[in-house]
Amino acid sequence: MTPTSTIAIVGGGLAGLSAALEAFDQANKHKTHATPPKIILLEKEKNIGGNSMKASSGINAVEPKNNDTMDDFYQDTIQAGHGQPELVRKLVQESPSALAWLTEAGVDLSVVSQCGGHSRARTHRCPPGPNGMPVPVGFKLVDTLKKRAQQLGIDMQTNARVTSLLLNNHNSNQSPSSYWTLTINGDTELKADSLVLTSGGFGGQIHASMENNIPTLLKEYAPQWVDRATTNGPWANGDGVRLGLALGAATIDMDQVQIHPTGFVDPSDPDAMTKFLAPEALRAYGGILLNAQGQRFVNELTTRDKLTQAILAQTHNDGNGGPVVIYLVLSEQAAKDFGASTLGFYAKKGLVQEIKRDDNQTANEDVTLTLARAMGLDDATTLTMTFKDYDGYTEKDPFGKTRFPSKMLTSPGYWLARITPCVHYTMGGLKINTDAQILSKDNETPIPGLFGAGEVTGGVHGSNRLAGNSLLECVVYGRTAGCQAYQHLVR
């Protein structure tokens, strides 16, 4: 390692922050050179965080308190998406240390829920703050790690978009034998001895082409989802994937785009193409899905792909030829367990409606009728029957559900939202190995000094991602990428 060695990290979400902090820790732990490497994190937006800031369901880790095991977690993940076994195994095995690392950094992840496709409760998120206000898990993780990076003096540059990469060979026998030239914002060059791509996916560009008329990656690889609403910010445009493709990197599962079954429909702007995510934790705590007739039609805790298919198969629309109408309904108990303060936040935005018993109502039938009318039904007959049947199920739910966190019919009130499936997560990306090395398309050997983590890469989730595995992937493979980027300098 030369005195001027540099590790560059492209992308400032959770994966990028994890990589930067791990590289810093490795350099200070080993101190193999008098001058530690300079670590530079480059974020093209004006703020650090990316899509990681929007994550709301939680981060997975094996939870022995709930009789969870490594094998249970591995089997759940493999069965859900059939990802690359060696990548999944690493994800699962390092989940406890990832959780411990975040906890040590100061993040309270003590609330645990069981999300769709999981056989055990293992999805960790933050409890409400001292004032009772919600603490969004994605925001808390990013904010905590960003502050630590600032305290350590890691160079984090915003409004710094990497537009091209070039791999160069040194003219001497120095180690490493090659280095990278990054072009930033089209006119500034940066040299780096190790390079980590953590720039996210391509689910934010949902139309057929971008502003410069270049076809979107969604159009190229998954055209069936073009022009469907998204939960992503527009910055998720596949920049890092395109940089990798230009270098001759291998890709995997590029056609596998996850449609999240529950994005909130804003009644004031139902056609908005960017939606707030209705977190899977809402269903984990007992939220149920109903069609426009007030009937259940699916196991609310099945995997996201199956749930999306079931929603899209519904044919009851709003009566005016509009889109399929699907409702998410929570009992008061489910709302309390999820967090009434968070629901209150959604309610202030007009995304969720609280259905209360008014002063003249004394029976549960009355508030159920109010709910039915809020759903556009003339009476509560079907809704009452749906709730009665649901409350009677244990292990014989016709849709296969085996976990029933709360009762519906006897609830003194409800929370109601309309939802729709949205483009959420691109499971494919640049191909990596378990050392987070990005592989060449020609022979699938590592490209020297190039590493990747997070949604810019593929292979971990296969055809379907479980809730809570994206944040975990960011930490596990982000830390691996940071560690290996440092090791590349000293080999």
Image (cartoon, rainbow, N blue to C red):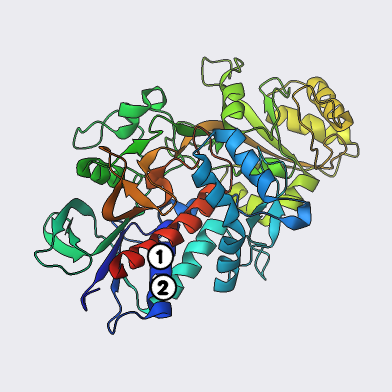
Q: What residue appears at the point 45 percent right and 38 percent down from the top-left corner?
A: 427
Indicate the quadrant containing the N terminus: top left, top right, bottom left or bottom right. bottom left
Q: Are marks 2 and 1 in contact (CB under 8 Å)?
A: yes
* Amino acid carrying mark 2 in the image: Gln
Q: Is residue 107 left or right of residue 161?
A: right
Total number of numbered discs in the rendering: 2
Q: Which residue type does callout 1 highlight?
A: Cys
Query: The C terminus is located in which quarter?
Result: bottom left
Q: Which residue is disc 2 drawn over?
A: 26
Position of 156 with respect to 298 (left or right) is left
The residue indicated by pointer 1 is 483
Name the residue at the left extreme.
171
Q: Residue furthest front?
A: 173
Q: Residue placed farthest to the bottom in the image? A: 34
The label number, if any, that marks residue 192 in the structure image? none
Percent across and percent down for residue 151 are 41, 79
Q: Is residue 340 left or right of residue 40?
A: right
Residue 466: where, in percent of width, then height?
58, 41
Nearer to me, 383 or 33: 33
Helix, strand or loop at mark 1:
helix
Spatial CA distance of label 2 from label 1 is 6 Å
The quadrant where residue 131 appears: bottom right
